[in-house]
Image (cartoon, helix red, strand yellow):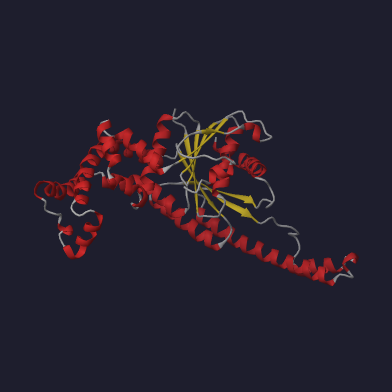
């Protein structure tokens, strides 16, 4: 059964993974069948749930780990790139023989670890597999930091261009000529440029391996192309996919958030909610620094402790500076959203909270704020 997808995006260090985990817990407490997926190789989502998960297995969260009653189901998974790549090849190759040949090819094995953008393609395939085959109400996805998330959204469009039959044929023609008469493709003919490179890698064999790999890959792409069309439509459908963009109140985070927000808009993808996380709790909001100083100096028990009085006034001054800066950033975030998405604020939580209590506390806040979605 196909449910909804909620993707958490944002730069590193803004608490995106913790909020994704809290959202998953919140929705499960409310009775939803939730699958939480991380495409972040650091496995932070598993750490947030205090689980040790490896590979693509789906693990069920133990509801007894939290105090609140969980009437729904929460499952967690992550993406192991090598395993997910093999599953992708198995699923979309026209035969098991071709699948095994692709997986055994050294170009393919090396490309999983080194080829630019390959992780985004594999991640997209895994998300599509889960979306098509797993039973869930909501698939909550924790994406890696900003640049990867943008590539993930651009992947379907890029793949559709790559998988265009005419583009594939342009690659295949010179490689097929090489198989017939041993002639290297044009850019490969210069011994000065690549002769030494090919000798290191195994000489002419590397071209033959790539040619065979390209032959098999073309058959794989023919079947995979239609799935890419479907996944592209799913990502662009606001009734299915909701984007939650997470940031925090500092200027660097705002700059990255603005880049992601505008890039998604340019791709036709709407942000459903903008969360400003780790907001500084404000105290003595009705007093300025001068009024606070006068109030402290009037306290008799501080009369013999000028160092304490000076320290408190200094800390209050720093606090007001932070609050004023965050208010300026709030205005910038609000202007960025332009009523196109919800803007939500999450307070900074106490640093000594254990993981379970932290997730439970954030789950309650998110539950109150996101109820209007459903």
Residue at 28 percent across and 39 percent down: it is 225
Towards the viewer: 171 or 164 = 171
Towards the viewer: 224 or 326 = 224
Number of numbered discs present? 0
Residue at 56 percent across and 42 percent down: it is 21
Q: From what the image shows, is residue 33 above or below residue 172?
A: above
Towards the viewer: 312 or 50 = 50
Residue at 54 percent across and 38 percent down: it is 373
Tell me the quarter of the image containing the N terminus. top left
Image location (x, y in percent) of residue 80: 43, 42
Tell me the quarter of the image containing the C terminus. top right
- Left or right? Give the position of 373 relative to 228: right
- Left or right? Give the position of 264 relative to 304: left
- Left or right? Give the position of 142 relative to 319: left
Q: Quadrant of residue 65?
A: top right
Image location (x, y in percent) of residue 163: 26, 44
Towards the viewer: 98 or 338 = 98
Q: From what the image shows, is residue 363 above or below residue 332?
A: above
Q: From what the image shows, is residue 255 above or below residue 275?
A: below
- Left or right? Give the position of 47 relative to 83: right
Image location (x, y in percent) of residue 220: 26, 38
Image location (x, y in percent) of residue 209: 22, 46
């Amino acid at each position: 059964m196909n449910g909804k997808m909620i993707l958490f995006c944002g730069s590193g260090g803004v608490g995106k993974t913790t909020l994704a985990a809290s959202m998953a817990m919140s929705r499960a407490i409310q009775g939803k069948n939730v699958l939480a997926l991380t495409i972040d190789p650091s496995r932070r989502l598993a750490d947030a749930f205090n689980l040790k998960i490896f590979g693509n297995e789906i693990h069920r969260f133990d509801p007894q780990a939290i105090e609140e009653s969980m009437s729904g189901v929460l499952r967690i998974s992550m993406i192991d790139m090598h395993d997910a790549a093999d599953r992708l090849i198995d699923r979309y190759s026209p035969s098991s023989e071709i699948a095994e040949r692709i997986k055994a090819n050294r170009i393919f094995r090396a490309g999983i670890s080194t080829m630019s953008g390959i992780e985004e393609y594999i991640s997209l395939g895994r998300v599509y597999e889960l979306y098509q085959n797993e039973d869930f109400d909501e698939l909550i996805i924790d994406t890696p930091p900003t640049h990867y998330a943008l590539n993930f959204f651009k992947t379907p469009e890029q793949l559709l261009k790559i998988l265009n039959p005419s583009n594939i044929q342009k690659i295949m023609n010179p490689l097929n000529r090489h198989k017939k008469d041993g002639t290297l493709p044009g850019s490969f003919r210069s011994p000065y440029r690549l002769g030494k490179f090919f000798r290191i890698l195994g000489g002419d064999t590397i071209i033959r391996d790539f040619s065979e790999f390209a032959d098999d890959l073309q058959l794989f792409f023919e079947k995979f192309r239609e799935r890419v069309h479907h996944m592209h439509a799913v990502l662009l459908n606001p009734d299915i996919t909701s984007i939650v963009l997470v940031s925090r109140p500092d200027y660097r985070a705002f700059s990255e958030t603005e880049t992601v927000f505008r890039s998604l808009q340019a791709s036709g993808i709407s942000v459903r909610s903008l969360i400003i996380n780790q907001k500084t709790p404000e105290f003595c909001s009705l007093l300025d620094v001068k009024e606070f100083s006068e109030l402290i100096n009037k306290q008799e028990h501080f009369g013999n402790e000028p160092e304490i009085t000076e320290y408190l006034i200094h800390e209050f001054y720093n606090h007001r500076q932070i609050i004023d800066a965050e208010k300026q950033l709030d205005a910038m975030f609000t202007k960025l959203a332009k009523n196109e998405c919800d803007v939500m604020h999450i307070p900074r939580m106490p640093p000594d909270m254990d993981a379970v209590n932290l997730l439970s506390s954030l789950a309650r806040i998110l539950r109150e704020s996101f109820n209007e979605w459903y």
